[in-house]
Amino acid sequence: MFKRVFDLVLVLGTLPIWSCILIVASFVAWLDLKSSPFFFQKRGGKDGKVITVYKLKTMTDEKDKDGKLLEDEYRITRIGNLFRKLSLDELPSLINVLKGDMSLVGPRPLLEEYLPLYSNEQARRHNVRPGVTGYAQVNGRNTIGWDKKFKLDTWYVDNQSLWLDIKILLKTVGKVVSRDDINEAGQATATPFKGSSNEL
């Protein structure tokens, strides 16, 4: 309950700032993409419940001759890439925090299609609300493998505290400023999770 109060105080207290930035970023994304600037995606939330996460679009909807979306690297726009570096694409997720679907800090919500692929240990990441940022995000983000991410996620579940959340939020600011760990080496975003071959 205290964590929820902490989230609401921070998000509502900074509402005039982040909402203004979101309005400007949404307008820029709309001009860039010539379409809706918002992106809605089903992801795994607390206790494995599926939630709809809100984000700003950073990619076009370009498809190949067979009607399949092109690879991420061909669809990310220059503005979209900048938004990712500054984490502006995550701003709409603060609405998820207000709704109670997410917390400011917690394991990042991943695609709904990953839910049946987790080992029992990895699935413990869903024992808490997913976060806009998390322990894995300030310790490698997209530059570390899935196994390492999940170990960091479950470590957070076992060691969460208000002080740890504050440290993660402060480190997140540093990561955004330095633009560290945004993309996996050789990838426009991150390699899709295919499941683990063993119980971690």
Image (tube, helix red, strand yellow):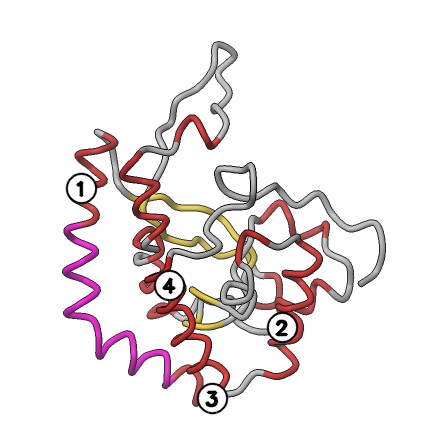
Q: CA distance from mark 4 to mark 3?
A: 22 Å
Q: Counting other residues with Cα less than 10 Å from the Cα at mark 1, is it few (<14), some (14-19), or many (20 or more)? A: some
Quadrant in which the C terminus appears? bottom right
> Magenta region: which residues?
5-24
- Front label number (4 vs 3): 3
Pointers 1 and 2 in contact (C-beta within 8 Å): no
Q: Which residue is nearer to you in this view: 45 or 73?
A: 73
Q: Residue at x 33, y 64 (%)?
A: 94
Give the mark nearer the N terminus: 1 vs 2: 1
Name which residue type carries label 1: Val
In the picture of the structure, the residue carrying the numbered disc 4 is: 96
Q: Residue at x 46, y 31 (%)?
A: 73
Residue 47 screen position, x and y as percent: 61, 67
Q: In which image quadrant can residue 31 be found?
A: top left
Q: Residue at x 36, y 50 (%)?
A: 85
Direction from residue 163 to residue 36 in the image, left or right:
left
Pointers 4 and 3 in contact (C-beta within 8 Å): no
Name which residue type carries label 3: Trp
Q: Residue furthest front?
A: 178
- Front label number (2 vs 3): 3
Direction from residue 48 to residue 195 in the image, left or right:
right
Q: CA distance from mark 4 to mark 2?
A: 17 Å
Q: Which residue is nearer to you in this view: 176 or 127?
A: 176
Q: CA distance from mark 4 to mark 1?
A: 22 Å
Magenta segment includes 16: yes
